[in-house]
Image (cartoon, rainbow, N blue to C red):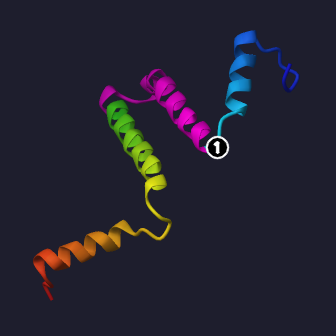
Amino acid sequence: MEGGVNMSTLQEEAVQMISALSDENVSYLIDFIKRFMQPTALKKDFSDADSKQLNLMQEMESMREKDKGYFPESFDQNHIWEEAMKEKYGSFN
């Protein structure tokens, strides 16, 4: 029993497994759960087009969050992009 709420054996097993995961893995799991659960919840509040666009944006944000682990904290993608544009096209001023 956790927090005064009776949990099924399956829920207890899930809680034990989650507690053994690293914070990064828990973050991935939460992202997965959100993507798994939201399409049905979104249909109540949004049209299908809005729901698809929101799902796409969530997927892009999830990918951006996962990419953070591959780059150093000092990585500035905007600066890299600006430098590449200057190198390729020069200055327009």
Tell me the chief SS of the magenta region. helix
Quadrant of the image containing the C terminus: bottom left
Residue 93 vs 55, above or below: the answer is: below
Q: Splitting the image into 4 quarters, where does residue 82 fall?
A: bottom left
Q: Residue furthest bottom?
A: 93
Q: Which residue is located at x 61 percent, y 37 percent?
A: 26
Dot 1 falls on a residue whose secondary structure is helix
Amino acid type of the residue tagged 1 in the rendering: Asp
Extent of the magenta region: 24-49
Q: What residue is shown with label 1?
A: 23
Q: Residues within 10 Å of mark 1 (few under 14, many from 20)?
A: few
Residue 76 horizontal/vertical position (percent): 40, 69
| Side (left or right) of 20 relative to 3 | left
Is residue 14 positioned above or below 88 on the image?
above
Q: Which residue is nearer to you in this view: 82 or 19?
A: 19
Q: Residue furthest top?
A: 9
**Which residue shows up at 48% across the image and 53% down it?**
69
Q: Position of residue 50 (x, y in %)?
A: 34, 34
Residue 51 in picture, x, y percent from top left: 37, 31
Comparing 35 with 54, the one in front is 35
Q: Quadrant location of the N terminus?
A: top right
Residue 14 located left or right of residue 65:
right
The residue lying toward the viewer, choosing from 29 and 61, is: 29
Residue, x 52% and y 36% (percent of image)? Answer: 31
- Residue positioned 25% across, 77% down in the render: 83
Whole-percent x, y for residue 62 in the image: 44, 43
